[in-house]
Image: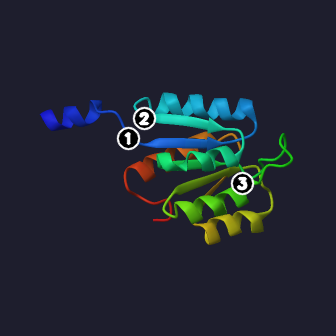
């Protein structure tokens, strides 16, 4: 009984990185996740993927990545290029691609070749991301 109580109050050790160039969307997602996971160690937002790469040594449990990252910074790599670089450096990183990408072949490439999970940005996307995070934290994969 005591161990069950102790488990509930201990803070999580997981770190989530959000890579999103739309500042309002990124802050909304971060706030949503902070409410849903109040004991999460950290939820950090990056406006460009290159900044996320510089922080990979912190071993994020999950990276939530937008596909289009160069709308405000033309020189910035897109999400797929950043994903490829993350997977080279930290191949076991859990990546959720959260994007409005309409082209199915792009989503399929991300999912299959880069071992990511694709979530289309829509009215249910935050809840889908929440469930995926729960699955990852609990040691389940989204592909089971």
SS class, disc 2 = loop
Mark 1 surroundings: few (<14), some (14-19) or many (≥20) residues within 10 A: few
Residue 9 percent coordinates (x, y) = 28, 30
Q: Residue at x 47, y 49 (%)?
A: 59
Q: Quadrant of the N terminus?
A: top left
SS class, disc 1 = loop
Do tag 2 and tag 1 residues touch (Cβ < 8 Å)?
Answer: yes
| Residue 142 in the image: above or below residue 138 | below
Q: Is residue 137 visible?
A: yes
SS class, disc 3 = helix
| Residue sitting farthest toward the left | 1
| Mark-to-mark CA distance, 1 and 3 | 26 Å
Do tag 3 and tag 2 residues touch (Cβ < 8 Å)?
Answer: no
| Mark-to-mark CA distance, 3 and 2 | 24 Å
Q: Residue at x 38, y 56 (%)?
A: 139
Q: Quadrant of residue 113?
A: bottom right
What residue would you read off at disc 2?
41
Q: Quadrant of the C terminus?
A: bottom left
Q: Nearer the viewer, residue 85 or 133?
A: 85
What label sits on residue 116 in the rendered view? none
């Amino acid at each position: 009984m005591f161990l069950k109580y102790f488990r509930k109050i201990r803070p999580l050790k997981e770190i989530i990185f959000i890579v999103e160039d739309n500042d309002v969307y990124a802050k909304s997602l971060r706030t949503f996740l902070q409410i849903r996971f109040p004991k999460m160690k950290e939820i950090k937002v990056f406006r460009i993927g290159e900044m996320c790469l510089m922080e990979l040594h912190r071993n994020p449990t999950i990276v939530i990545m937008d596909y289009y990252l160069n709308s405000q910074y033309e020189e910035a790599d897109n999400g797929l290029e950043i994903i490829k670089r993350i997977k080279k450096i930290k191949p076991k990183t859990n990546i959720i691609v959260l994007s409005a990408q309409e082209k199915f072949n792009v989503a399929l490439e991300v999912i299959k070749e880069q071992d990511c999970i694709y979530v289309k940005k829509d009215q249910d996307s935050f809840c889908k991301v929440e469930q995926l995070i729960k699955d990852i934290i609990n040691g389940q994969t989204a592909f089971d």
